[in-house]
Amino acid sequence: MTATERLMSGLITVLAGLAVIFMLTPLVVTVLVSFGSASVFTLPPPEWSLRWYERLATLRGLVPAVVTSVQIAALSTVIALVLGTLCAIGLTRSSVRGSEAIISFLISPLMLPGLVIGIALLQFFREFGLRDAWISLLLAHVVITLPYVARTVIGALSLFDFTLIDAARTLGHSYPAAIRKVLVPVLAPAFMTSGMFAFLASMDNYPISIFFSDAWTKTLPIQMLQYVEERPDPTIAAISTCLILLATLAMIVGDRLVGIRRMAQF
């Protein structure tokens, strides 16, 4: 390795380290503030305390918001896994004209601002007379979770040799059995990866959910915004820390079941 290459390698390492520090600093500050005793956001805190986590048990509207978010996230992820897998198989196994355009359309919600998608979906639902907040939230979250599944499963299927299914059938397996024994194990990491990111994206979504929430149906991010408006104390930091813990646990489970390196391939 030449001196120039060593210099560039060191420079890249330093820049990557600074980028990591820049991205993680707000999370670290949030966690530290949540364990403080002060009634305002103070760092370092005057003393350590669990008062804000204890307050979560009596916080008005928190449990219904969490239940609604988990229900919407889980159901929209399941629907997105089914629809995304069917779309991926159809696009990779058939010679559909304009398949690249269809794939771009499927992942387009990832490239558009959430407010734009929210306004468009709100107008679309109004045209069809859909007024139910829960159903509207579910359909909107399917739209934003589907791209994660479609992009990941299409990438996994593009690397799969479908002749293995034919080989399994020649060995006596039926077509469903061949799919179950050959294709499903190969796609399991893609399902795990896309499902995890889809669930977290749904749980954390704010710009689209705000258009479909009402006084009785609120997701957790919308309820957190209300808390900030009513009483901006470190309780919001405690809730945010719980969400950070949820994402961390999801990454740990994914690493144990699939592996971080393999998840990063999709």
Image (tube, rainbow, N blue to C red):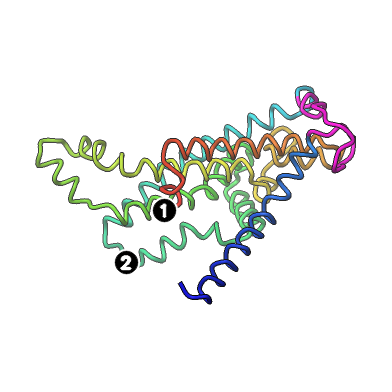
Residue 152 sits above or below residue 113 on the image: above
The quadrant in which the N terminus is found is bottom left
Q: Residue visible at 64% across and 41% down? A: 131
Q: Residue visible at 34% across and 44% down? A: 187
Q: Position of residue 25 (x, y in %)?
A: 72, 50
Majority secondary structure of magenta residues = loop
* Residue placed most toward the observer, 98 or 36: 36
Residue 26 sits above or below residue 244 on the image: below
* Residue placed most toward the observer, 251 or 132: 251
Q: Which residues are magenta?
A: 35-56
Locate residue 190 relative to residue 223 in the image: left or right.
Answer: left
Locate residue 186 relative to residue 60 in the image: left or right.
Answer: left
Q: Position of residue 55 (x, y in %)?
A: 80, 25
Q: Which residue is mark 2?
A: 97
Q: Residues within 10 Å of mark 2 (few under 14, many from 20)?
A: few
- Kindly tell me whether residue 44 is visible in this rendering: yes
Amino acid type for the residue under numbered disc 1: Gln
- Give SS at disc 1: loop
